[in-house]
Image: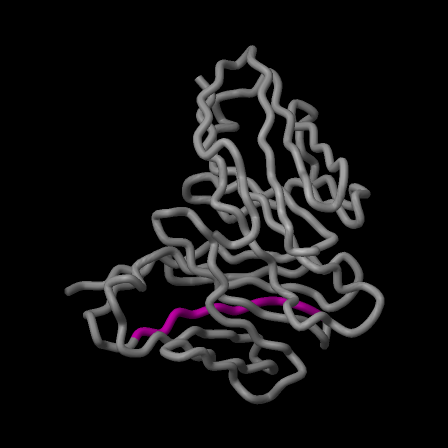
Amino acid sequence: AQTVTQSQPEMSVQEAETVTLSCTYDTSESDYYLFWYKQPPSRQMILVIRQEAYKQQNATENRFSVNFQKAAKSFSLKISDSQLGDAAMYFCAYRSAGAGNMLTFGGGTRLMVKP
Amino acid sequence: ETGVTQTPRHLVMGMTNKKSLKCEQHLGHNAMYWYKQSAKKPLELMFVYNFKEQTENNSVPSRFSPECPNSSHLFLHLHTLQPEDSALYLCASSQDLTGGTAPSNYGYTFGSGTRLTVV
């Protein structure tokens, strides 16, 4: 079974600064997808960014980018120019490309943004 | 509004009550999921429905009973719950990936959840 680990229960960042959230995963599969989800106090789980394992290029979405290291099974999220609205729980998730293909989540990282 | 709607948003129920949570999606997805999110615990997958058929029951107690009448609707029927069942219950939908090429959107879309309190 796959496992996803987020080793930072909480992180804080100054507004306009950059922060990196860590995620590692364990799998024996070669084809899969990785995601970062954001859950603000409104509770809505919002997709931030996603990465196909077969792509070597790191995904980027505006201020959000990932550092995907397939051999190391690492998938960190970098948030640049942090904004107050970025404060939320962030979840890393893994989805197999094969049968079943359910999302497995990490334990989450609470990000606080200081004005 | 993300396309997945959950009702009610909040629910308080006694241990002897029977209630149902509802989830609805109109995204054309063919897989739907129930997750439980408790404080200080990872999200726990409860049930998976693929093309209306239950494909996963993650050792969930029988006091939780899912129902999926069609690909757009998913229910979670609750009866004789315990206080430790108090949590946020999240519904999600996705396009199933089996059978070949991944669709352009291979992620899950979540609802806003139902905050359940069992008293």
Residue B43 vertical placement versus A82 (above, below)? above
Picture quarter with the C terminus of chain B: top left
Specify whether A115 is left or right of B40.
Answer: left
- Colouring style: one colour
Specify whether A94 is left or right of A110.
Answer: right
On the image, the x and y values in percent for residue A110 come to 34, 56
Q: Please name the residue shown 45% across and 74% down the image.
A: A76
Q: Please name the residue shown 44% across and 56% down the image.
A: A108
In depth, the one of B33 and A54 nearer the eye is B33
Residue B46 vertical placement versus B30 (above, below)? above
In depth, the one of B15 and B9 nearer the eye is B9
Give the number of callouts: 0
- View extreme (top): residue: B16
- View extreme (bottom): residue: A57
Specify whether B100 is left or right of A57.
Answer: right
- View extreme (left): residue: A115
- View extreme (right): residue: B99
Residue B16 vertical placement versus B98 (above, below)? above
Q: Write down the quadrant of residue A26 in the picture.
A: bottom right
Specify whether A23 is left or right of A17.
Answer: right
Q: Please name the residue shown 60% across and 81% down the image.
A: A70
On the image, the x and y values in percent for residue B3 come to 56, 52
Q: Which residues are magenta?
A: A19-28
Q: Does the segment drawn in magenta span residue A50?
A: no
On the image, the x and y values in percent for residue B71 come to 74, 46
Q: Please name the residue shown 31% across and 60% down the image.
A: A111
Main SS of the magenta part reads: strand
